[in-house]
């Protein structure tokens, strides 16, 4: 079967991966209510397409924090690509470059951020998990800066690692399976390695680096307003793919209140459960500047390495293009809330 | 089993048709969310029947753009009837005539519009897909005019062919299976043959023909108002049977806003998921002048050719008659929104 | 298995009855949407029980149109009890008497209304289907009057027999299976025998008999107001057990608007999908004076004749008593809308 | 399999227990609608987690009616622990002590309240079912007082035993299976032994004991206000685990109106369907001071006696701690309604 959509990649990836690794990538926390609801939330939103618009040319190029990308589709930071494919993050980053989009490299990458940067032909952001030693964290941030990473996305929804029961049943421990070279030492588990971040961490980070800062994992207007006060450049509305607090609101349902609170003062992104071009269209209509794709990237990687990731990104691009054309929205500026019936 | 309702015809048709052809007729785009929701939307609407009304005579004759028909049930334009039955559109059009209703002949018919007209005993409309050469399109329109087609229904929801994955999996390509004699050349795929229409196309069409013009595929009040400005005679509220933009609003849920916007300035029709007389009753109560039937016509055709189509139409007529009687609405004028609990 | 609730009787009855007869009793019209929704509608209503009320004595005696009954649970008129049990309506009416409640005898009974009256020890109402000859209908009404029937319930939701597809598939024709002695002639099918009633029929009926008149099958405030104008003594909110207009509003959801319209000027009853004491409690809280039970009576009859009917009624009585006790409503007067969270 | 959550304990307990005993513990009344809805109600509530809060220390110690407990999680009174494990309530109470929380001992315990008190190392409340002789009831209350029980929780939702059909099918009679030493005599069934309580019973109880009084089983604002008038110290919002009035509102949905009515004048607790730390978090956010756990305690007991109960409590504590951390609520005071999207 030649996969025609992301769900095909999902099935193929599940066939290929060792069950415990599949479960690690696939699972959510507790009863996976948030994981499921993230998909259903998209299916509940209805589109109001416009017709007889000139959609002969579809234009989806945009910029993210000033960096041009060929489409409003970014690669979310996810851990340990080496478990999905021998080339790991190198394969992913090359596909990102070919697709002319941006990859957010995770602190939990299976390769060092230098190695990933070396393989990159496109722009990178660095997703940061802080170490409890701010000195060590500062070094990592400066290294990312020197390597040309263009922004720091501080993930703020993981003061503790969520309760992922699939991993418990499988006795799956990430550190036993993969090197985590961006962590300074291996003596304590990765989960315990990083500190509890507060708004002071954000201030410290802003003082430490000139790079723009994004906060990843905000789900409320209250925190969006605090983020603005703390002068962040971007917010990523996310529930960590349903892997942290189970029962947390689907990110697409949190997006409107964040967009409303922010009032254009910083860029707003969203991730979680995006599998179709129409999902992206819905996110854009609700005010997201771009979306992040998590698991589907790993499915592509598992099925066909760099080519698989490339194909996943191309499918999404084609689907978004189709969706924009069929919705009568030939460019990003024309995508607004009137496209939706909530 | 003698089929007693349209769902019986559906089952029988599926048994008889080659799976890839069944899938072509049956399928929707992407995840078929809109396809499914179109049915559910009807089931959610509740009827408030009136009693002790004199329903000894049920009167459902009406006119559509001035043309009398025996019932507010028209045949939607669908492609390539030849794949369902050897007699193709000839069988369909004969059944339409016997039922004293109107058929909308598709540009994508398996027979030429002249051949269909020759077999017809009842009124016809012509469903137009424009060719990128307006000259060629103009010729086709004038041919329809000369052949006695009484209106042109320009389909506006298909600037690109929707993503129908069943066809992709089946490697089903319509042009390889059927002649499409109303397309001027066979060198490029039908999908790419027609142009991207805009409101200018509508103006051009109005200048080109004296026939009344309908726009098929409008789902918003905004576009309904533009249609009025561009002086169309009718609007067909439709999402193309769930085959174009997946996630598009069920047409029956878009109908109220279109009716409200139009305020009687043109006729409003609806199609999509209509399988029961009560569905028709609901559509009429929401302001549709008549409904169009797509797939069920093909089911009838596949099962029993002309007789099958005739029977499908008769079942719908009988069911509508029953529904009107049981709802205490003996004629079309008595069907109004108070019949519904939304 | 000793049946402990009505659903047990349902299962046992299905085992015992010939499938075509089961289907006749069980089925609804078209897709049985209304049939299903009638049950779901009850499950959606939530109870707000009160506590620390003295419920040592539960009192549910009431009157229906002035006639005392031991509980607000009546036997709905249903056709042809002879198909369920050899003793037919005689068994049913005896159980009604034993339970000190009222049976509404159907025009479509398998026994003559005189025979049923002769076996009765409790009060009876007569459910009337009119014959197209008013003379014949008048005779039947006067016969009922003379036999001591205390009211006439004119069924108004059946100007045509609903589309019951189970019967079509089974080629089940009621007249071929059972005598219908209350119909004057057997030459045309029962379905065609009766006339199309209008409000004039109601006026005629009022002039013809001194008995109080109920209209069975009203689902709207509009018709309830007309019923008041035409001086009926009672309204039975009903969709005929989902056997007439499919898609009709669940009767329990129509009840509030009827009660609100009537403002106490006549008695209001409800039937459809009542299977539990808590269902009855909900109906009473929404303003019904009593409820009618249709199919479950037939289940009892099929399983165990008179004893079965008796047991079904006793189960309902016990469940209602329990429900009243647990809801802190020791008598009917204490049951009001504050019991419900809709 | 080492159980990682309460649902694992549920499965293991079902494997271990005799089916009729499992059914006794597991079942609800009638159709178990309330039982099911109690779980669904929790799943419908969405969390709005806050981020970048210092959650390095999670503090969940609290007091219940002045008594310190290590967490806002109490053991609900449930009958006959001896059927789940040979050590019965002794095992449960020891686990409660180890967990530094409070057990509410049921009148229907399989052991005498003296025996349970003797095994206890933590605080106890006594759940009271009144005997129809107030003299006997008074003695029991005074005994509890002398034994050091710190409060009396009068259960008010059981003027009759709910209709638990599993027990009927299984011919399961509690008294035949277990001693009920807190009942004064064995000559009539336990169900009939206790009286119908009214608000006078509450006044009598207040006059009889100096212990604070809680009412268990209130579901409405109306009764909450009466409880305040009758000077109770606490209200337990409960539908008795879906075992009394089927169709009763899920307790978590009744909680807001009770909290709103009470306005802090007494403590409010809730139970029913709590299986996850996030459920507890939701209950706290809606204004509960603490929650009670019913069936899961029995599952732990059945699987592993005292250790099992301990583990169940520890799982809940850990999950609550995790949920508080991930929601950005480091202490109980920070948990408020803004955490929820209803
Ligand atoms: C296997 C896996 C690993 C992840 N690792 C990280 C990570 O290291 N850092 C991070 O900020 N988010 C991580 N996430 C969350 C993703 O960045 C993203 O928020 C989420 O996957 C989006 O949902 P989706 O997978 O449904 O697209 C991870 C997600 C998954 C599934
Ligand atoms: C197999 C198939 C072919 C179709 N071909 C056309 C077409 O050529 N032109 C057009 O305007 N609509 C076409 N449609 C859409 C129908 O006109 C109509 O909008 C839709 O089928 C109505 O939904 P229903 O099938 O649920 O009744 C087609 C639909 C189907 C299912
Ligand atoms: C088998 C059957 C026969 C019925 N026959 C009659 C009838 O002769 N006259 C009438 O007014 N209603 C008739 N009804 C409708 C019932 O009076 C009643 O409205 C309905 O059954 C109530 O719903 P339930 O069956 O869910 O309780 C019939 C219903 C059934 C199921
Ligand atoms: C087997 C069983 C026995 C119970 N016995 C009592 C009891 O003796 N007294 C009482 O007040 N509540 C009793 N309850 C109700 C519980 O105290 C509590 O309200 C309910 O179990 C909470 O729901 P949960 O089981 O979903 O946690 C019992 C519940 C169960 C399941």
Image (cartoon, coloured by chain):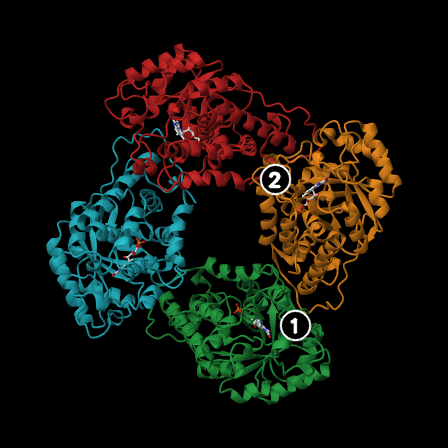
Chain colours: A red, B orange, C green, D cyan
Of the two numbered discs 2 and 1 in the rendering, the one whose residue sits closer to the viewer: 2
Q: Is residue A32 above or below residue C317?
A: above
Label 2 close to label 1 by CB (< 8 Å):
no
* Left or right of B62, for residue B14: left
Q: Quadrant of the N terminus of chain D?
A: top left
Residue corresponding to mark 1: C229
* Left or right of D331, for residue A15: right
Which chain is indicated by disc 2? B
Q: Going 38% across and 17% down the picture, which residue do you hit?
A: A206
Q: Which of A54 and A91 lies nearest the eye of the viewer?
A: A91
Residue corresponding to mark 2: B248
Which chain is indicated by disc 1? C
Q: Quadrant of the C terminus of chain D?
A: top left
Q: Which of A341 and C64 lies nearest the eye of the viewer?
A: A341
Give coordinates of residue D134: x percent, y percent. 20, 71
Q: Going 49% across and 65% down the picture, which residue do you hit?
A: C286
Let me know if residue B265 appears in the view.
Answer: no
Neighbor class of circle 2 (other Cα within 10 Å; few <14, some 14-19, many 20+) is many
Give coordinates of residue C93: x percent, y percent. 51, 82
Q: Quadrant of residue D162?
A: bottom left
For disc 2, does the CB lie below 8 Å from ligand 2? no
Give coordinates of residue D236: x percent, y percent. 29, 55
Q: Is residue C311 above or below residue B55?
A: below
Q: How many marks?
A: 2
* Left or right of C105, for residue D57: left
Q: Look at the numbered disc 1 and give the secondary structure of its residue.
A: helix
Q: Quadrant of residue B100?
A: bottom right
Distance between mark 2 and mark 1 Cα atoms: 47 Å
């Amino acid at each position: 079967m030649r996969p025609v959509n992301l769900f095909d990649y999902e099935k193929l990836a599940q066939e290929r991966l060792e069950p415990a690794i599949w479960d690690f990538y696939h699972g959510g926390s507790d009863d996976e209510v948030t994981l499921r609801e993230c998909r259903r939330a998209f299916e509940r939103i209805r589109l109001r397409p416009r017709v007889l618009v000139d959609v002969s040319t579809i234009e989806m190029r945009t910029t993210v924090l000033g960096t041009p990308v060929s489409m409003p589709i970014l690669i979310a930071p996810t851990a340990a690509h080496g478990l999905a494919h021998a080339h790991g993050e190198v394969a992913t980053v090359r596909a990102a470059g070919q697709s002319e989009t941006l990859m957010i490299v995770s602190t939990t990458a299976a390769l060092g951020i230098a190695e990933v940067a070396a393989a990159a032909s496109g722009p990178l952001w660095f997703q940061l998990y802080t170490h409890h030693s701010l000195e060590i964290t500062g070094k990592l941030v400066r290294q990312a800066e020197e390597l040309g990473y263009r922004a720091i996305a501080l993930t703020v929804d993981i003061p503790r690692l969520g309760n992922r029961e699939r991993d418990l049943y499988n006795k799956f421990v990430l550190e036993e399976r993969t090197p985590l070279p961006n962590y300074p030492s291996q003596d304590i588990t990765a989960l315990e390695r990083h500190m509890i971040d507060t708004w002071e961490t954000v201030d410290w980070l802003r003082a430490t680096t000139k790079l723009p800062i994004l906060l990843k994992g905000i789900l409320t207007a209250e925190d969006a307003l605090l983020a603005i006060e703390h002068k962040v450049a971007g917010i990523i509305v996310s529930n960590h793919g349903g892997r942290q607090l189970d029962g947390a609101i689907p990110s697409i349902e949190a997006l409107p209140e964040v967009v409303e609170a922010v009032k254009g003062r910083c860029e707003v992104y969203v991730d979680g459960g995006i599998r179709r071009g129409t999902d992206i269209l819905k996110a854009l209509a609700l005010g997201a500047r771009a979306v992040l794709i998590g698991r589907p990237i790993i499915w592509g990687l598992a099925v066909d390495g760099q080519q698989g990731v490339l194909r996943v990104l191309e499918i999404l691009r084609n689907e978004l293009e189709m969706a924009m054309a069929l919705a009568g929205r030939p460019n990003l500026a024309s995508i607004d809330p009137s496209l939706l019936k909530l």
